[in-house]
Amino acid sequence: MRLFVANLKLLFRNRQLLFWSLAFPLIFTAIFGLFFGKDVGGGSVALVNNSKTELASSLETALEKSDLFSVRTESSVESAKKLIKKNLASTIVEIPATFGQNTPTAAKTIKIIFDPAAQQTSAVVTVFVDKFLTGVNYKLQNAKPIYSLDVEKTVEGTFTYFDFVLIGLIGMALMNSNIQSLAINMARYREDKILKRITTTPLPTWKFIVAEVAAHLVLNIIQVAVIIATGVYLFGGHVGNNIGLLFVLSLLGAVLFQLIGFVIASATKTASAAEGMSTAITIPMMFLSGVFFPIDQLPHWIFSIVSYLPLSPLLRMMREGALENLSPWSTPMNLIIVFAWILVALGFAVWRFRLTEE
Amino acid sequence: MTDMAVVIVVENLVKRYGKLAAVSGISFEVQKGEVFGLLGENGAGKTTTLEIIEGLRRPTSGIVKVLGHDVAREMSQIKTRIGVQLQSSAYYSYLTLREILELFGSFYPKYLPADKLLKSVNLLEKAKSYVTQLSGGQRQRFSIVASLVNDPQIVFLDEPTTGLDPLARRNLWELIAQIKSQGKTIVLTTHYMEEAELLCDRVAIMDKGKIIALDKTHKLVEQASKPFKVSFISDRTDTVASQLKKIGTLTELGGKTDHFEITLATAASLHKALDLIRTLQPASLTVTRASLEDVFIEKTGKTITEEENAPVRR
């Protein structure tokens, strides 16, 4: 128990470790949050409604009620264009003054001006307005549509790219801090003969390892909580309702990465070698396991390899749980891969990791 | 139960790394309450021997018993009763001295209060410092006191003074004498001759994995074939040099001009030599007995240098 407390002190007094395990993922969260978090400009529509007719105002209401984009009302096209320049809006919907009037000269078209950089929003807005107009056209002609669409989302609720990355960042933080910290600490303890010194005391090896692992798990819980809190409250991210599951999966991942840390510590001789090897493992995994982008977009042969990396199935389970409200049992393969890695790493660590050399 | 005074028994101890024999069949006993020194150059097998007794390495063959328990089978009974200080070891960087002592104490069924230990080595005011904030001598004192945390019966010190300045070394000698005065047995390794001579009741000289001499320190010194030594300074040695060379080994010391040393086998030859040297009216004349270093050089045919040129065994 005292060793566990001592390990906690060691972790929290090590500023370098704290930076990599807490500040570093938070910086990433903030960067992605600022770019992709709360919709700042990308999904914003500037509405210039010059008409006072019923039809115009009903379009205005329909746009405002839509949850596909946010609407800002502007008095002129010029001021709306300024918004686009400032990146506060991406698409302008201009309703001409005579639109909807019951006169022959009345304007019959609505103008959409869009920022080519935000084609997705403009496409959504265009379809939306087009559909609205089609509806009006049918009504005027007293016709009823015969064919219709039944659109269904694959996922409950909406999630954004930021939500996707937020889960990825949790995985990244768990991987980096556990692999790096365990590998470097153990290698350094061995270099400094702390491990050997402990072997001369009656303390059983398993207690030493359990205390080390437990202290890291405490750090991991704080890590995950801080990242989720920052992502959700500061940048409007979503992690679903099953926070408990997210923590359980995080700790499962933490145990796996700690074991990998022990493996690295037993395969290297010095702390700097351990540092190099853990960087060589974590950096590629960060990109190939889908922290920042979905790996199923990779060429098939690469995907079929990288989807078996330790971090990949963990992120899949965490995302399914957080974003799609699915249980980890829904795709047992993910759990199987994670447990297979745990067994492999555990086996190697038990086989090779020693507190002292012969 | 034949001899209660013997606390460590080593019999025909062999440790091989592949074809290399680090320790090749050594035997010795350590008595309760004595300071026992393993003397030898780097790579002679001192640390390997010590670490086998401490249970850190497995012997290839041979028997090692500590406090009546076999290290191969009953290490757990031994561990609570020994204290170990490792060669050039470090401690946790982010724990204070007090925290480290309390932590290591908690590994034992009973342990001494941290502050009492720190006070005994004048480190109480550093209780809240990290090890990295200590000087070399303070670190080494801490490292030794950390090996006393369980109030052990036997303390193992592996090169406790290597790399320290003379004053810090003298401090440590006092500390080691103080530990001995508490009735503890001390086993230490060193490659400093004067340290072994000053501290150890008995010394085993190791060379290439073997013990080539083992006795009480003063008896070892008496084993020197030429136990008397006369040092003098004179610029007129030509007249008596040939006569001196007949009765002893005359050497002109390198580096300094007119400094000479002669080693002699018997008291009679000592007197003869002194008579001869007096005729030179030397600027300086000192008579000393041979040192452990002289014995070591005679026995091994080499000198110990501080240079770490010997391969380090890990």
Image: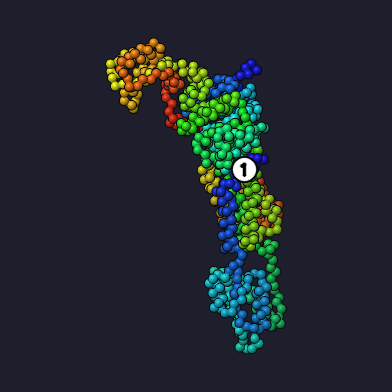
Three-letter amino acid code at disc 1? Answer: Asn
Vertical order, A8 against B282 (above or below): below
- Is B293 placed left or right of A73 in the picture? left
- Is B42 placed left or right of B249 in the picture? right
Question: Which residue matches tag 1?
Answer: A7
Let me know if residue A229 appears in the view: yes
Chain for disc number 1: A
Which corner quadrant of the image does residue B93 belong to? Answer: top right
Q: Which residue: 48% across, 19% down?
A: B212
> Looking at this view, is B313 or B151 the one in front?
B151
Q: Which residue: 56% across, 33% down?
A: B121
Mark 1 residue crowding within 10 angstroms, few (<14) / some (14–19) / many (20+)? many
Q: Position of residue A208 (x, y in %)?
A: 63, 38
Identify the image's colour scheme: rainbow, by chain, secondary structure or one colour: rainbow
Q: Which residue: 60% across, 46% down?
A: A11
Locate the N terminus of chain A and report the quarter of the image it occupies.
Answer: top right
Locate the C terminus of chain A and report the quarter of the image it occupies.
Answer: top right
Q: Residue furthest top?
A: B268
Q: Which residue: 62% across, 38% down?
A: B103
Q: Position of residue A162 (x, y in %)?
A: 61, 61
